[in-house]
Image (cartoon, coloured by chain):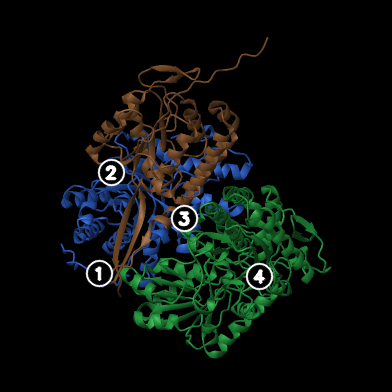
Chain colours: A green, B brown, C blue
């Protein structure tokens, strides 16, 4: 049975070389007991009067209380953003705007350990990832877009770019600070002001970010952070004085947003879900491909929209790949996100854990074969072991629906054509992976796969210069690169 | 009795260090003794630059941008000293801001200058910019800081290394900029500054077979002769331009086009 | 004397016993995996365990033209009792020396359990006719060395004469008698990780008991990514044939932190069964004192000075 045995100790991973706990200290983070909303450069109490706790996924400890914005709060924030836009920010010399963004980038670098620890505490991801991936990338996004602020004519020659105005931005819980930087950096570089709503379960790094804004001396109202749940997001989306909406989250909510902004003329970009195919050919460098598979689905506990959740293995190497994969899964360390040796952290919330369990149960019921390496899971908090299903049919729920957890489905193929057909056979189109020695095959697959990001002989690589976004129901619009500026600009031509 | 200040010596900047001219000569200018560089100093500077090229050119564009931004941080930190040397706060402001402007180009040049080319056949074809190598710069006489910044930043942002012949009549800003570079994580040899007589030094740089490009905006006499000797190894030559454009940086970049078939 | 089977240009290894396919290695991915493994934080008792193991796995090495019986005597003393001030520190696995010094080492180490490994086959270059290399190995085996560290012929390998490389390993193995055979690939000369894998499989096919990265005479010597590639080849051989081959990174491992990183890599690639001097050795000289300093630091809580550890 796949039932995760939290109470009963399975036999420990056999090892003569036990790694002692290596926890990163959390003393570097100073948390307030309670946070208000950050509007017009100040901390204000929510007019809604509502607060809710933010808990740590690893043990359900309440870290702080955060405000839940109501309609009036959202309105005030949009007003502050509009004010800041009209009175100064949009007319500020672009070179000066650039320098504010450079400051923010630098301060994030200086305080990156503090942010990394808080990110891992609040969200559940391993400190090694928040320290080595989330934080450096977040700072890099600010650096990259800082450089564009005074060069827009070169990005869009002859088009006379101008900011759109006030941007409303709603971000998810899987990469809280990184998603914040993907949204705020280009918006500000293009000359807009922003109201950003962090995810309900991961507000804390966004709130700490307000302190970075203070240190950077960013003019008040340019960035406003309103915490809350789905209701606050919906208020922001439908607010008439917001010129542009940027949303990253589930496809279901994305469709809601499209419906609610229909006919309003609001600019919209959506970065939604995915069910990416990760395709291994028989001439792939196999040990490295297995690393790519692991990285593709177990990085960030699989809470990644572009996760390689459908593994397509060429039938001729199926046995070998699955054997290597299972062996490698057994060396994954699931545990305290703040332990430097942890590979797989906690599941972000109770709700997400339930969803994962539901789909895994469906997988077993439909006839797929499950494997989970033995691992000892903590008593408290929300946890799920790395899981792989073989004997999966294309029609099974686990092969169709986005699980957003550390669960991989393995299917086989015989020829490149078959791989392409099956990979494309989904309403999603965010990303795909291709593993082969042969250059021409990489390019041919890249040409034919209907996905916005194609990783060849690698997976889950991100860079501020590299545009990211989906085809089909994975959304539209791109973030990163020169292209990431376009959604935040108006053009005369 | 008022305190006697410690006077600064102004030496060459080469390979990350501050040596005197191998000739032992100096000249008095702007109230100080400044190294009077020789042809051998230029030779050594080119060698130091070439030695640093593989490292600087191989850094990611992002890293280069970071280093260049740090240079701006250090320049800003020395505002007062630069303002005194140049006699103009505005010039210092402009110089720092221009440096920041170029720092922001490091990880964007490839996106603006490079292309993916839709050739008529089953081939993937792309063009990318790459640094040309050692860029020799004859710096403008005026303005002493902003003039140099306008020529140097675009030359190195794309990964090139350089040898600068500083303003002859107002070299102190250049040497002070060299001190900024030395404290900014810029690898030694990426920028080398030789002070002295342009008439003596420029021809050496222009005729050196291991220099790949020349910026002659600051050359005063006999530009024709310099361009003639530069022809021997087909140096890329830049003469003017206003100094704030990614296309200025592009003058020092090669373009490489790669083809690869698309097939199963 | 049997000839090596003619190897077709596709370079598929002999089928009996069946060996894993050669395949290819992605450089970026393998270097990244090695870097991620190196981030493991090994503290407290796990660190003490690793350091003790590192000492027990060490092949204390001197391979200089200037080596004399006196130098060998000092090396052997150090090998048997690395830290005279702390007798709980175990002896090392072996000393690794030139053939002419073997008798002196054997005498010195008698009864101690520390093995004598000797290089052979025209170490380090291997640029000598095959007959002479095999003869040297035979003499070394006769002289009583416990282990033989041979070099492959890189000139033959890089010019595509794989059969010659294979043949030499096989012939040296044949004359090694009871001495176990380590085959040095000199990875720093092979150019690509693909070649490292190829050479690993070739050496194992020829009869290597251990595959070893380097002679220590050129740069680069052992690195974490190269070691990972070799460990993965060993793993594939084990999966395919059940045979356990040992591995020895040599040269370039100067401090304890690196040594522990190698052990982490070994642990996570091949598993705890390989955490034994029978299957893993460090080829090093200055590493030992750094490990001793770290062991003492763990015991006393103080950072140490080299002055307190003997230089033999």
Tell me where residue A440 appears, x and y as whole percent: 31, 70
* C-alpha gap between disc 4 and disc 2: 62 Å
C236 or A196: nearer the eye?
A196
Dot 1: within a 10 Å radius of its alpha carbon, few (fewer than 14), some, or many (20 or more) residues? Answer: few
- Kindly indicate whether the residue at mark 4 contacts the one at mark 1 (C-beta within 8 angstroms): no
Q: Earlier in the sequence, mark 3 or mark 4?
A: 3
Residue C99 tag number? 2
**Host chain of mark 2:** C
The quarter of the picture where the N terminus of chain C appears is bottom left
Say which residue label 3 marks.
Answer: A154
Name the spot of residue C54 as percent of width and height, x first.
48, 50
Q: Which residue is label 4 attached to?
A: A348
Work out whether A55 lies above or below A371.
Answer: above
Q: Position of residue B193 (x, y in %)?
A: 41, 30
Quick one: label 4, few (<14), some, or many (20+) residues within 10 Å? Answer: many
- How many badges with numbers are in the image? 4
Q: Quadrant of the C terminus of chain C?
A: top left
Q: Secondary structure at mark 4?
A: loop
Tell me where residue A74 sits by quadrant.
Answer: bottom right
Are labels 3 and 4 on one chain?
yes
Q: Chain of mark 3?
A: A
- Compute the Cα span from label 2 to label 3: 69 Å
- The answer to the question of whether label 3 and label 4 lie on touching residues, with beta carbons closer than 8 A, is no
Q: Which numbered mark, 3 or 4, is in the foreground of this view? A: 3
Provide the residue designation for mark 1.
C12
């Amino acid at each position: 049975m796949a039932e995760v045995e939290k109470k009963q100790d399975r036999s420990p991973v056999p090892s003569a070389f036990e790694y002692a706990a290596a926890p990163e200290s959390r003393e570097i983070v100073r948390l307030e007991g309670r946070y208000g909303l950050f509007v017009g450069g100040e901390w204000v109490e929510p007019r809604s009067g509502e607060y809710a706790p933010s808990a740590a996924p690893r043990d359900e400890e309440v870290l702080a209380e955060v405000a839940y914005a109501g309609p009036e709060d959202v309105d005030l924030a949009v007003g502050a953003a509009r004010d800041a836009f009209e009175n100064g920010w949009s007319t500020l010399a672009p070179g000066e705007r650039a320098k504010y963004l450079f400051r923010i980038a630098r301060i994030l670098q200086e305080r990156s350990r503090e942010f990394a620890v808080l990110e891992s505490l609040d969200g559940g991801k391993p400190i090694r990832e928040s320290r080595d991936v989330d934080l450096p990338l977040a700072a890099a996004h600010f650096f990259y877009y800082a450089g564009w602020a005074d060069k827009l004519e070169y990005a869009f020659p002859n088009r006379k770019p101008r900011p759109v105005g006030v941007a409303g931005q709603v971000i998810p819980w899987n990469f809280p600070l990184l998603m914040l930087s993907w949204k705020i950096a280009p918006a500000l570089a293009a000359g807009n002001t922003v109201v950003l709503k962090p995810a309900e379960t991961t507000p804390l790094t966004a709130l700490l970010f307000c302190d970075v804004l203070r240190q950077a001396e960013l003019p008040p109202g340019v960035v406003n952070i309103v915490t809350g749940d789905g209701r606050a997001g919906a208020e922001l989306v439908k607010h008439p004085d917001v010129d542009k909406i940027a949303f990253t989250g589930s496809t279901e909510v994305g469709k809601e947003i499209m419906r609610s902004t229909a006919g309003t003329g609001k600019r919209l970009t959506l970065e939604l879900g995915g069910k990416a195919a990760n395709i291994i050919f028989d001439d792939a460098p196999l040990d490295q491909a297995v690393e790519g598979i692991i990285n593709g689905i177990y990085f960030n506990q699989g809470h990644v929209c572009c996760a390689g959740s459908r593994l397509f293995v060429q039938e001729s190497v199926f046995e070998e790949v699955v054997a290597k994969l299972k062996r490698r899964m057994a060396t994954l360390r699931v545990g305290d996100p703040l332990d430097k040796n942890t590979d797989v952290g906690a599941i972000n919330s109770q709700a997400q854990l339930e969803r994962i369990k539901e789909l895994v149960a469906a997988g077993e019921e439909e006839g797929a074969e499950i494997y989970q390496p033995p691992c000892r899971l903590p008593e408290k908090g929300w946890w799920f072991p790395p899981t792989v299903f073989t004997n999966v049919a294309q029609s099974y729920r686990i092969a169709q629906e986005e699980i957003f957890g550390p669960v991989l489905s393995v299917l086989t193929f015989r020829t490149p054509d078959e791989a392409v057909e099956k990979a494309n056979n989904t309403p999603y189109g965010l990303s795909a992976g291709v593993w082969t020695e042969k250059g021409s095959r990489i390019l041919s697959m890249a040409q034919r796969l209907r996905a916005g990001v194609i990783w060849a002989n690698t997976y889950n690589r991100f860079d501020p210069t590299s545009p990211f976004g989906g085809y089909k129901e994975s959304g539209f619009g791109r973030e990163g690169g020169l292209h990431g500026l376009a959604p935040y600009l108006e053009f005369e031509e | 009795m008022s305190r006697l200040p410690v006077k600064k010596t102004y030496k060459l900047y080469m390979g990350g260090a501050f040596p005197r001219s191998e000739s032992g000569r100096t000249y008095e200018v702007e109230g100080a003794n400044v190294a009077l560089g020789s042809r051998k100093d230029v030779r050594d500077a080119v060698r130091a630059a070439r030695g640093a090229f593989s490292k600087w050119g191989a850094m990611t564009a992002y890293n280069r941008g970071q280093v260049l931004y740090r240079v701006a941080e250090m320049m800003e930190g020395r505002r007062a000293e630069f303002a005194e040397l140049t006699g103009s706060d505005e010039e210092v402001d402009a110089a720092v801001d221009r440096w920041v402007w170029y720092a922001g180009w490091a990880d964007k040049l490839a996106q603006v200058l490079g292309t993916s080319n839709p050739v008529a056949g089953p081939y993937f074809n792309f063009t990318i910019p790459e640094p040309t190598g050692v860029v020799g710069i004859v710096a403008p006489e005026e303005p002493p800081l902003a003039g140099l910044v306008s020529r140097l930043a675009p030359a190195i942002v794309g990964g090139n290394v350089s040898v600068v012949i500083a303003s002859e009549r107002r070299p102190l800003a250049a040497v002070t900029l060299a001190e900024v570079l030395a404290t900014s994580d810029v690898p030694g040899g990426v920028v080398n500054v030789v002070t002295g007589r342009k008439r003596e030094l420029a021809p050496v740089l222009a005729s050196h077979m291991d220099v790949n490009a020349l910026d002659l905006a600051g050359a005063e006499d006999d530009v024709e002769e310099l361009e003639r000797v530069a022809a021997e190894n087909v140096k890329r030559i830049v003469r003017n331009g206003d100094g704030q454009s990614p296309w200025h940086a592009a003058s020092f970049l090669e373009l490489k086009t790669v083809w690869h078939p698309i097939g199963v | 004397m049997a000839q090596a089977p003619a190897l077709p240009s596709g370079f598929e290894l002999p089928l009996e016993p069946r060996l894993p396919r050669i395949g290819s290695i992605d450089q970026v991915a393998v270097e990244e995996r090695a870097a991620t493994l190196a981030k493991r934080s090994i503290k407290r008792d796990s660190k003490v365990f690793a350091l003790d193991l590192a000492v027990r796995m060490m092949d204390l090495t001197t391979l200089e033209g200037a080596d004399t019986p006196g130098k060998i005597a000092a090396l052997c003393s150090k090998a048997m009792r690395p830290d005279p001030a702390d007798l709980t520190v175990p002896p090392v696995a072996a000393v690794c020396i030139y053939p002419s010094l073997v008798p002196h080492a054997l005498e010195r180490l008698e009864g101690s359990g520390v093995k004598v490994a000797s290089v052979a086959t025209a170490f380090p270059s291997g640029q000598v006719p095959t007959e002479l290399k095999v003869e040297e190995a035979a003499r070394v085996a006769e002289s009583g060395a416990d282990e033989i560290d041979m070099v492959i012929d890189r000139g033959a390998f890089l010019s595509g004469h794989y059969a010659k490389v294979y043949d030499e390993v096989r012939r040296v193995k044949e004359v090694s008698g009871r001495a176990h055979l380590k085959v040095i690939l000199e990875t720093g000369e092979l150019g690509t990780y693909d070649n490292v894998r190829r050479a690993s499989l070739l050496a194992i096919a020829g009869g290597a008991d251990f595959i070893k990265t380097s002679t220590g005479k050129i740069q680069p010597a052992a690195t974490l990514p190269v070691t990972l590639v070799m460990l993965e080849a060993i793993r594939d051989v084990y999966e395919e044939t059940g045979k356990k081959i040992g591995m020895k990174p040599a040269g370039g491992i100067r401090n304890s932190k690196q040594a522990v990183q190698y052990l982490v890599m070994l642990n996570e690639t091949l598993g705890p069964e390989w955490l034994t001097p029978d299957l893993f050795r460090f080829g090093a000289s200055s590493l030992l004192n750094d490990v001793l300093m770290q062991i003492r630091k763990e015991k006393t809580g103080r950072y140490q000075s080299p002055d307190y550890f003997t230089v033999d």
